Image (tube, rainbow, N blue to C red):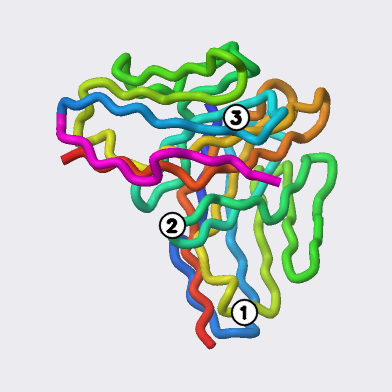
Amino acid sequence: GENVEQHPSTLSVQEGDSAVIKCTYSDSASNYFPWYKQELGKRPQLIIDIRSNVGEKKDQRIAVTLNKTAKHFSLHITETQPEDSAVYFCAASKVTGFQKLVFGTGTRLLVSP
Amino acid sequence: GAGVSQSPRYKVAKRGQDVALRCDPISGHVSLFWYQQALGQGPEFLTYFQNEAQLDKSGLPSDRFFAERPEGSVSTLKIQRTQQEDSAVYLCASSLRLAGAVDEQYFGPGTRLTVT
């Protein structure tokens, strides 16, 4: 089955810096890659996703890149703000079928003012 | 509109007790998922329903775990004879299930289960 690895487990940056979180997946049939943000004690919320027919997607300060050949994808946050502090999870699934999500282990991002 | 809701938000059970966790998905959502999130880990898939049909239960850790969705809306996850290793946050998610489209999963706030 699918296995998703995520690095780093913890990331500390200064406000205004960029942050990059990386994930690798094992199943070449996976073709949908969402990223979730989870604040302490709250529900995971989708912040951006990408399908395997594109290599990059941007939404304001957030971007995701995908390298299908290498089976890795990354989340990029620019101009970080303290409210970006949270745990970020990557996930992988197939668009066909019922889209069971396989999650990475999470990255705790701390943005210091 | 209302999102996915779960109850109770917190549950403390003595080892050996049975518990029932409830999920109210977004109205009209066909797909419903249960995930288990251990402390410091990502959510792990437990089971999936399409309407009232349980199409995949491959992630349920043991036969002490049972889930149902009898009318295709509200779902209940039941854990019998709870063990300490069952302590986790149990997340429910629902999605619209548009054929051939990417299907965003909306998560509930979770139920934090602590087995003492």
The image quarter in which residue A79 lies: bottom right
Residue at 80% across / 27% down in the picture?
B98
**Residue at the farthest bottom position:** A113
Horizontal relation, residue A21 to residue B27: left or right: left
Q: Considering the numbered disc 1 on the image, is that residue within a helix, a strand or a loop?
A: loop
**Mark 1 or 2, which is nearer the eye?**
2
Is residue A59 rendered magenta in the image?
A: no
Horizontal relation, residue A19 to residue B59: left or right: right
The image quarter in which residue A48 lies: bottom right
Q: Mark 3 points at which residue?
A: A100
**What is the crowding at mark 3: few (fewer than 14 residues within 10 Å), some, or many (at least 20)?**
many
Could you tell me which chain the residue with mark 1 belongs to?
A: A
The residue segment tinted magenta is B1-15
Q: Considering the numbered disc 3 on the image, is that residue within a helix, a strand or a loop?
A: loop
Q: Mark 1 points at which residue?
A: A81
Residue at 71% across / 39% down in the picture?
B104
The image quarter in which residue A92 lies: top right
Mark pair 2, 3: CA separation: 23 Å
Residue A98, given in percent of the width and then of the height, sits at 66, 23
Residue A5 drawn above or below residue A9: above
The total of numbered circles placed on residues is: 3
Q: Can residue B38 be seen in this view?
A: no
**Residue at the farthest front position:** B1
Horizontal relation, residue A112 to residue B37: left or right: right
Residue A75, given in percent of the width and then of the height, sits at 66, 60
Residue at 51% across / 24% down in the picture?
B75
* Residue A41 image label: 2
Residue A35, given in percent of the width and then of the height, sits at 64, 51
The first of marks 2 and 3 along the sequence is 2
